[in-house]
Image (tube, rainbow, N blue to C red):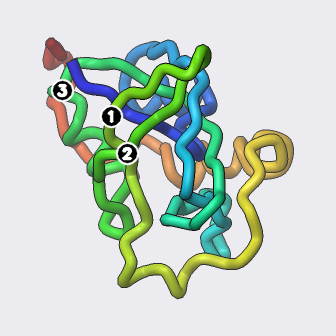
């Protein structure tokens, strides 16, 4: 099984279901010494190292056959890297998260990204703009069974 720490749009159950093609349940966690900033001109964030910062998100568990789906969704500005996620009760787990590539950092603003603002102001347009069936990468054939 694979583990993903999601800190941005994939925290929204509707968006996660559309991307993964199934319902995934996330558990709250946080990543220390990182920050989550808005991407210039976009509704989604990028996470980068940031001393003393804390990023809240959800930890998802799924079949590793979904990695190509998430890789395609995240695109070339992100790289999948191991991070330590802190869970309730002080438990730590080493999992993967999509960090914003250092070469793309100039695309980040200094404004912290806010999930509540995204849900209120940008969720519907994000679903239309980024998750329309004709715009999504075809990683699996229709009807292909995920394991």
Q: Residue at x 55, y 18 (%)?
A: 27
Q: Residue at x 46, y 34 (%)?
A: 85
List x then y, in percent, for residue 49.
Answer: 49, 65
Q: Residues within 10 Å of mark 1 (few under 14, many from 20)?
A: few
Q: Quadrant of residue 58?
A: top right
Q: Is residue 21 left or right of residue 34?
A: left
Front of the two marks 3 and 2: 2
Q: Is residue 70 left or right of residue 49?
A: left
The mark nearer the N terminus, 2 or 1, is: 2
Label 3, label 1: how far apart the Cα atoms are? 15 Å
Q: Are marks 2 and 1 in contact (CB under 8 Å)?
A: yes
Image quadrant containing the C terminus: top left
Q: Which mark is residue 16?
A: none
The mark nearer the N terminus, 3 or 2, is: 3
Q: For the residue labelled by badge 1, is the local secondary structure a helix, a strand or a loop?
A: strand
Q: Which mark is residue 94?
A: 1
Q: Residues within 10 Å of mark 2 (few under 14, many from 20)?
A: some
Q: Which sits in the foreground, 5 or 67?
A: 5
Q: Is residue 128 left or right of residue 134?
A: right
Q: Which residue is mark 3?
A: 64
Q: For the residue labelled by badge 2, is the local secondary structure a helix, a strand or a loop?
A: strand
Image quadrant containing the N terminus: top left
77 lies above or below 89: below
Q: Which sits in the foreground, 34 or 47?
A: 34
List x then y, in percent, for residue 117.
Answer: 83, 48
Q: Which sits in the foreground, 109 or 83?
A: 83
Q: Quadrant of residue 142?
A: top left
List x then y, in percent, for residue 74.
Answer: 38, 54
Label 3, label 2: how far apart the Cα atoms are? 17 Å
Q: Which sits in the foreground, 71 or 51?
A: 51
Q: Which residue is mark 2?
A: 83
The mark nearer the N terminus, 3 or 1, is: 3
């Amino acid at each position: 099984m694979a583990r993903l720490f999601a800190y941005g749009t994939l925290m929204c159950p509707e968006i996660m279901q559309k991307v993964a093609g199934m319902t995934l349940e996330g558990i709250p966690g946080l990543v220390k010494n990182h920050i989550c900033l808005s991407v210039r001109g976009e509704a989604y964030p990028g996470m980068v190292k940031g001393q003393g910062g804390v990023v809240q998100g959800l930890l998802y568990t799924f079949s590793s056959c979904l990695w190509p789906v998430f890789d395609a969704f995240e695109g070339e500005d992100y790289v999948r890297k191991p991070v330590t996620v802190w869970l309730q009760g002080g438990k730590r787990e080493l999992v993967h998260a999509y960090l914003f590539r250092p070469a793309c950092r100039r695309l980040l603003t200094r404004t912290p990204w806010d999930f509540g603002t995204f849900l209120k102001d940008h969720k519907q347009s994000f679903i239309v703009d980024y998750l329309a069936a004709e715009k999504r990468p075809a990683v699996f054939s229709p009807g292909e069974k995920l394991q």
